[in-house]
Amino acid sequence: EPEVTQTPSHQVTQMGQEVILRCVPISNHLYFYWYRQILGQKVEFLVSFYNNEISEKSEIFDDQFSVERPDGSNFTLKIRSTKLEDSAMYFCASNSGLSKNIQYFGAGTRLSVL
Amino acid sequence: AQKVTQAQTEISVVEKEDVTLDCVYETRDTTYYLFWYKQPPSGELVFLIRRNSFDEQNEISGRYSWNFQKSTSSFNFTITASQVVDSAVYFCALSRGGAAGNKLTFGGGTRVLVKP
């Protein structure tokens, strides 16, 4: 069964460093998302991406964040200068656009900022 | 603005008991979708069900059933004859309807612990 793949599963970084979280959405899906979940809290929307541009972003998604679909298969989230409060689980999701907004999630990348 | 409330933070049951998870939502949209996702201890989010706002029929899938009541803005989830493998955090979520691609707004989740 097709699945969303995220790498790495765990990323440890120093405060102020740049990180790139990678995702391979399900093939032929058209809509892509990043969500985050701070430990023990709810899952929060960060950004959605369609047709090579951001379609919606939350107030969390400030200038430190960016997304890119560099090669037609990968979908990346970059955090330019990480802060301690960026420590969270980051989930990538994709949606075919045909299934009434069912979003399929990857296993997540746990980001630890020290 | 959309909001999803899961008032139960944690429920503990003994295997074979039924457990019902409450979900109450708020939205001004006339068309919307409701979802349940399961997050097992391994951490991934697993899609369980989607319901659109026009379809208030209850649904049953094996030991899982869902009760959607528009009048009370609720979309409750029942696990019948719970098993240890049902231990997980369950999230209710809401999105606008209409165009594809809308974001999900999640509730705070309910942790279900099924003891043998």
Image (cartoon, coloured by chain):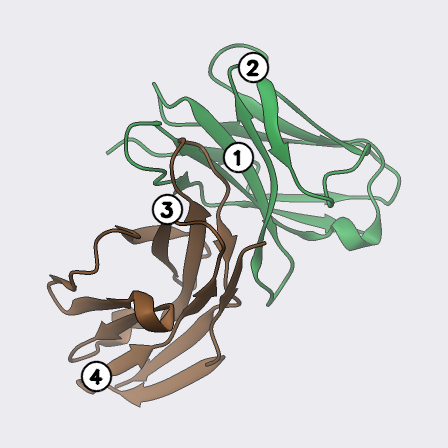
Relative vertical location of residue B18 with respect to residue B1 in this rendering, above or below: below
Asked if labels 1 and 4 touch by Cβ distance under 8 angstroms, the answer is: no
Q: Left or right? Give the position of B66 relative to B31.
A: left
Q: For label 3, count other residues whose C-alpha is less than 10 Å away and answer few (under 14), some (14-19) or many (20+).
A: few
Relative vertical location of residue B92 with respect to residue B77 in this rendering, above or below: above
Residue drawn at x 44%, y 32% is B101
Picture mark count: 4
Where does the N terminus of chain B fall, quadrant-wise?
Answer: bottom right
Which numbered circle lies on residue B31?
3
Mark sitting earlier along the chain (1/2): 1
Distance from label 3 to label 4 (Cα)? 31 Å
The kind of secondary structure element at disc 2 is loop
Q: Amino acid at mark 4?
A: Asp
Q: Is disc 4 on the same chain as disc 3?
A: yes
Chain where mark 4 sits: B
Residue drawn at x 21%, y 60% is B56
Q: Position of residue B83 (x, y in %)?
A: 21, 76
Chain depicted in green: A
Distance from label 4 to label 1 (Cα)? 34 Å
Q: For label 2, count other residues whose C-alpha is less than 10 Å away and answer few (under 14), some (14-19) or many (20+).
A: some
Q: Amino acid at mark 1?
A: Tyr
Q: Amino acid at mark 2?
A: Asn
Disc number lying in front (1 or 3): 3
Q: Position of residue B37 (x, y in %)?
A: 37, 57
Residue drawn at x 31%, y 88% is B13
Q: Which residue is mark 2?
A: A52
Distance from label 1 to label 3 (Cα)? 21 Å
> What colour do you see for chain B?
brown
